[in-house]
Amino acid sequence: MSARAVPLAVAQIPNALTLVRFALVPVFVVLLARASGDHSWPAGIVFGVAGVTDQIDGWLARRLHVESEFGKYADPLADRLMIDAAVILLVIDDRLPWIALAAIIARDALLIGGARFVMPRGYEFHVNALGKAATWVLYAGVGFTIVTHKSTQWPLYVFWAGLGLAVLAAVVYVVSAWRAIHR
């Protein structure tokens, strides 16, 4: 099925969902900030909706063959903004340790800086299964941390597993990019 085979309105759904995720970031921040360090189901629901729309927009774009340059850059940026905002607020509320924030920021800086270095050399990033799994587990770990009480430990294990997968995915991306540009 080519991009021309779907109506324009349908072809725009993936990018519209990405824009919805951008719009959800400040809503999420306000809801979690109002929780004042306690758990927040409203913030958790908004965070969960963002995670689900991330999966839906990517699936639709691939399924309908309507992947776009906008989506290629905006989709991962929307994810990073939502996850980073959540981690920052959870660190401020002492619900995640500061090292979690340092690791997330270091990973994001590596990916953003790396992309700016390798893309002008012709390398194109393609999301792999490990990167998708890392995002899902990170969303789950952060989401569970948001909706549970501060003393609940198991969401932190899910978060650390997601962060480990995210770091591993970043290493895979870096090695792949390095090999591609040094052929």
Image (spheres, grey):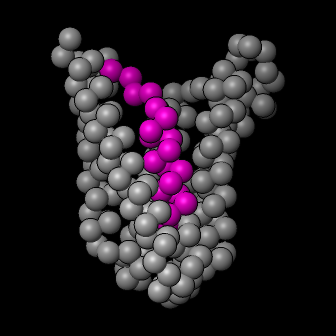
Tell which of 169 and 177 is nearer to you.
169
> Which image quarter is the N terminus in?
top right
User: Which quadrant is home to the C terminus?
Assistant: top left
Q: Residue at x 57, y 27 (%)?
A: 68
Q: Residue 20: horizontal and vertical position, in percent?
A: 65, 52
On the question of residue 71 being in view, the answer is yes
At 66% from the left edge and 75% from the top edge, which residue is drawn?
A: 42
Can residue 82 be found in the magenta stretch?
Answer: no
User: Is residue 68 or residue 57 the one in the foreground?
Assistant: 57
Residue 148 position, x and y percent, is: 57, 79
Instruction: Characterize the magenta stretch by its predominant secondary structure.
Output: helix
State the residue at coordinates (50%, 54%): 137
Would you place residue 109 above or below residue 130 in this image?
below
* Residue lying furthest left: 182
- Would you say 19 lies left or right of 175 here? right
Q: Which residue is painted at 54% across and 50% down in the image?
A: 136
Highlighted magenta segment, given as a residue range:
123-142
Q: Quadrant of residue 3?
A: top right
Q: Is residue 136 magenta?
A: yes
- Please state if 38 lies on the left or on the right of 15 as rendered: left
Q: Nearer the viewer, residue 4 or 42?
A: 42
34 up-or-down from 134: above or below: below
Numbered label tally: 0
